Image: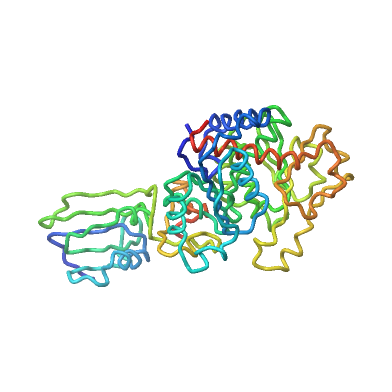
Amino acid sequence: MLKGRNLIDPQDFTVKEIEEIFVLAEEIITRPEEFIHLCDGKVLGTLFFEPSTRTRLSFEAAMLRLGGKVIGFSEPNSSSVSKGENLADTIRTVAAYADVIAMRHPKEGAPKYASYYSDVPLINAGDGGHQHPTQTLTDLLTIKVAKGNFSNLTIGLCGDLKFGRTVHSLIKAISRYENIKFILISPNELQTPEYIKTEILHKKSLDYIEVERLEEVIDKLDILYMTRVQKERFFNEADYIRLKDSYILDNAKLKTAKKDLTILHPLPRVNEISMEVDNDSRAWYFRQAKYGMFVRMALIAKLLGVK
Amino acid sequence: MLSINSISKGIVIDHIKPGYGIIIFKHLGLDKADFTVALIMNAVSDKQGRKDIIKIENEIDIDLAMLGFIDPNITVNIIENEIIREKISLSLPNKVEGIIECKNPRCITSVERGITHKFVLLDEKEGRYKCEYCDQIYSWEG
């Protein structure tokens, strides 16, 4: 039962609970007209303390397509945060107005802290370079559609694995399935954080390797998850400039890849996937974005207990 | 030979790793005590070579979680009528609050006013903790 729960970390929900969300999401994809009044009278609060267009629009579109309404702000300068209001007070106030809250914050752990002050379900819509569990629901649903199941997959995660919150969340979530192998592809400076290795990869004795070159391993992959090197996560711009084009996936690199490879990307993309790849049948990232809205519709409905 | 009188009623914190006595002393606020306290540093120990000891001639509330976090090998002896009434062995606590601060500049604890720094035990064998908010890993020795 997900009614009234928070989604802060991908492991907040069991595998079975996530499967329930996917079942509902697939029903919505098939028969969207049946769900247009599901959230009549309900309000979603979108608190975006950090700029985000896609995730915010995805949440807003999800609630509007369910018949609900949306309130909130898309950058802190337009809210009481600019007057010095602390996070706890902002959350307590908005929780009085909304039935469910989606929150993005540049600081890691902010949604967890906020959840202590919220009387309504709180969804982590991304916290710094830490976690992004609704992107993970999106990724998992896409993998489910593309591959049919989550087991026996070799998953390549490529790019900024240090600050790539979508990667951290995906590793946490998909590591619960059987016979998953990870190939972590990144520059040395942007390797997967220690807590993910300790808490997930080592603790569960998962099969993983870390490499620097995509070309060495692309032929082994069932899933290739590309990520952007995020300018906003660097304290030093010179480091960003040095690392930003570490990986560019193009048709030449895909020559040795499996015919049924699934290429994912949380978007927005900058340079890491060449546009020539967009027409390849293995490119799933735009379908992935669409699934994001449907899976958020299902999540909101479950947390509100209307389905 | 340094002589410290035994106490008649109070607490003896024993088997403290050398150098950690002063940290515990300050953390317990004993530097501001208006009752008799003694901090003994580098005492000879059969078990561990050298150790620190704190003797407190008073009944005070001791944060056992904090002591266990600093060094789970510490023992706490409750003294009554100059004899040990109770000997408490410590272990690493599952949760520590307000003892250390998260050093991750990207953590919410770096900006939010009034937030309590909280850590949860990640690895008992290696004494490693993670920040409850951002998951950054810490041990007492940094």
- Nearest the viewer among A224 and A198 is A224
Classify residue A117 as left or right of residue A37. Answer: left
Residue A201 visible in the current orientation: no
- The residue depicted at 16 percent of the width and 66 percent of the height is B5
- Nearest the viewer among A237 and B30 is A237
Vertical comparison of A144 with A90: above or below: above
- The residue depicted at 57 percent of the width and 33 percent of the height is A18
Number of marks present in the image shown: 0
Residue A109 visible in the current orientation: yes
Q: Position of residue A53 (x, y in %)?
A: 67, 53
Q: Where is residue A252 in the image (x, y as percent from the top left)?
A: 89, 45
Classify residue A213 as left or right of residue B52. Answer: right
- The residue depicted at 27 percent of the width and 72 percent of the height is B31
- Nearest the viewer among A262 and A204 is A262
Q: Which colour scheme is used?
A: rainbow
Q: Where is residue B87 in the image (x, y as percent from the top left)?
A: 23, 49
